[in-house]
Amino acid sequence: MSAEARKTGPKGTRRRANRGRTASGQPNPIDVHVGARVRLRRTLLGMSQEKLGEALGLTFQQVQKYERGANRIGSSRLFDLARVLDVPISFFFDDMPDEVSALSPRLISGLGEDPAPFEADPMSKRETLELVRAYYRISDPNVRRRVLDLARALGLAGE
C-alpha cells in the first residue's frame, strides 16, 4: 500500500491521524498528565485560564483543552508555558507514574489492549489547591503551625 493510500479513507477522503490518542480515542495519559501539571502550577499561582491565555496569545478555551489533555502541547508552546508559569520544562513531567510514561504515543499501535485509565493526582484537585493557597495567606507563623497541627490531628482521627 502506498503512503498516500494509507493517508486516505473511504472514497479518497483524507483520514485524520490519531494524534497520539489511545486506541479508544481518549487523550493520551501523558498529555493528560502534562495538562494537569499546567493546571496545578497555574492554580498555585492564582492565575486564571483567561490570564494564562492572554500571556500565551490563546483563548481560555484553548487553555482548558490543554489542561484536560484534549489538545496536545507542542514543544514551542511547552517552552512558553514554562516561561509564563516560571517553572523548568521538566516540571510538566515530574511525578509521572511509570505506567503513564509507558504510554508514549510511539508505543501505541492501536492493535493492543486499551491502556489503564489515568487517575488524577490528588495534589492537583481544586480543593487541595485552595487549601494550600488559604494556608499560605495566614500571615502569623504560629497560627499557620497550629492549623497544620489541626489538619494532621484530623487526618489521624479519620484512620
Image (cartoon, rainbow, N blue to C red):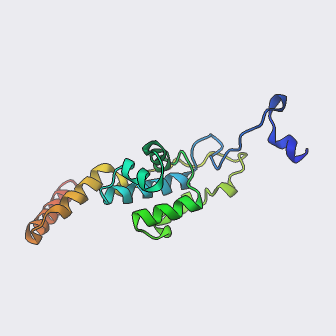
The front one of 44 and 156 is 44
Residue 11 visible in the snapshot: yes
Residue 102 percent across, percent down from the top left: 60, 60
Left or right relative to 61: residue 116: right
Asked which quadrant contains residue 141, the reply is bottom left
Image quarter where the N terminus lies is top right
The front one of 117 and 125 is 125
Left or right relative to 95: residue 6: right
Name the residue located 64 percent from the left edge and 50 percent from the top edge.
20
Residue 95 visible in the snapshot: no
Name the residue located 17 percent from the left edge and 62 percent from the top edge.
137
Q: Which residue lies most toward the top here?
A: 11
The front one of 102 and 12 is 12
Could you tell me how many numbered marks the image carries? Answer: 0
Residue 119 percent across, percent down from the top left: 45, 50
Name the residue located 42 percent from the left edge and 68 percent from the top edge.
87
Residue 77 percent across, percent down from the top left: 54, 58
The front one of 95 and 73 is 73
Image quarter where the C terminus lies is bottom left
Residue 156 percent across, percent down from the top left: 19, 60
Left or right relative to 129: residue 11: right
